[in-house]
Amino acid sequence: MVLKPLDKLKSKYMGCMLGAAIGDALGKQNEGLDRKEILENGYVTDYNKARAGLPGEKLRAGQYTDDTEQMIVLAQSLIECNGFDAVDFAGRIAKWGADAQKDPLRKSLVGPSSAAAIARLNSGKSWKESGSDIPSCGSAMRVAPIGLFYKDLEEIESNAVLSSIPTHNSKGAIAGAVAVAVAVRSALCEKDCIAIIKDVTSRASKYDTDLAKKIRLSYEIREKEPEAVSAEMGTSYLVYDTIPCAFYCLSRHFESPEKAILEGVNAGGDTDSIACITGALCGALHGIDAFPEKWLKGLENREMIEHLASAIFEKRRIL
Ligand SMILES: [Mg+2]
């Protein structure tokens, strides 16, 4: 069935947020394992529980991690404030983090940068001073709703920067958030892969030229096998690894979203965040139809995520 342009755009909005959650829920099964261990355990292609000892071991099959939880917090803040409001968002993230740390099932999911920043926010520090200086990917993994909410790349860039500061205030983390938010918008606009990479690197390079260069490189080496790329580029939780790895997965399988997400899920290292970012970009490019029905059916809180994405879609039509 051929969708009308507006229906197609709405499907891309929902696909973006669902894709992030799907990638996260699939990728949690391999979080912290290296590529060799993953291949020995078996290439992951569907939901399951994470093995004992991994950060998400207590979560159910199809349940996502902190990446998607933080993305949901950001989406809710954008909807209720009619745009990005740093005070509101920082307050919500501080509450989310405090709740997650009290929950035995989710406690181990909160990353060290987020945990330290959340402690500072909850002790009364301003959002301008609470952010960590570790260049980890926590603000990039949650930022997709900024790319959905704003149309103009200038506004997307400035709000992605603001959204990073309360928890991740290093130049690398800020550049990472800008890169992913800009990529979401460029993907919504039906750009081809090299055009998306150009938009992303020209904006991200204002904050961190090293990250921008590595994102460009991830596109240039897209024909190389993942074994070589994992070793050459790295897959750690730092933005210099997670973000280029996600762009490699996207570039390598630009027309095959299922393959792109599974490439991220099985890349090694910070697989939940790599696949979360890859999934958001695939969904923004291809819409909900990008994903197999079993991934949509088995996803925790699918309706709630669809509802948030469609609320952002409706807001942006009015504003
Ligand atoms: Mg996670």
Image: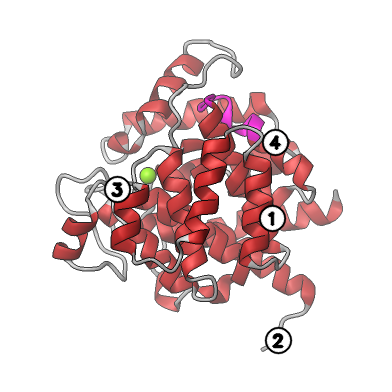
Q: Which residue is mark 1?
A: 185
Name the disc covering residue 269, or none. Answer: 3
Question: Which-is-in-front pick, marks 1 and 2?
Answer: 1
Q: Are marks 2 and 3 in contact (CB under 8 Å)?
A: no
Tell me which numbered mark, 4 or 2, is placed earlier along the sequence. Answer: 2
Q: Distance from label 1 to label 2 (Cα)?
A: 22 Å
Per the image, the residue denoted by label 4 is 159
**Residue 148 image position (x, y, % from top left):** 68, 53
Does 221 appear above or below 69? below
Q: Callout 2, which amino acid?
A: Val
| C-alpha distance separating marks 3 and 4 | 28 Å
Q: Quadrant of residue 41?
A: bottom left
Majority secondary structure in the magenta region:
loop
Q: Residue at x 73, y 64 (%)?
A: 189
Residue toward you, 112 or 49: 112
Magenta residue span = 161-170
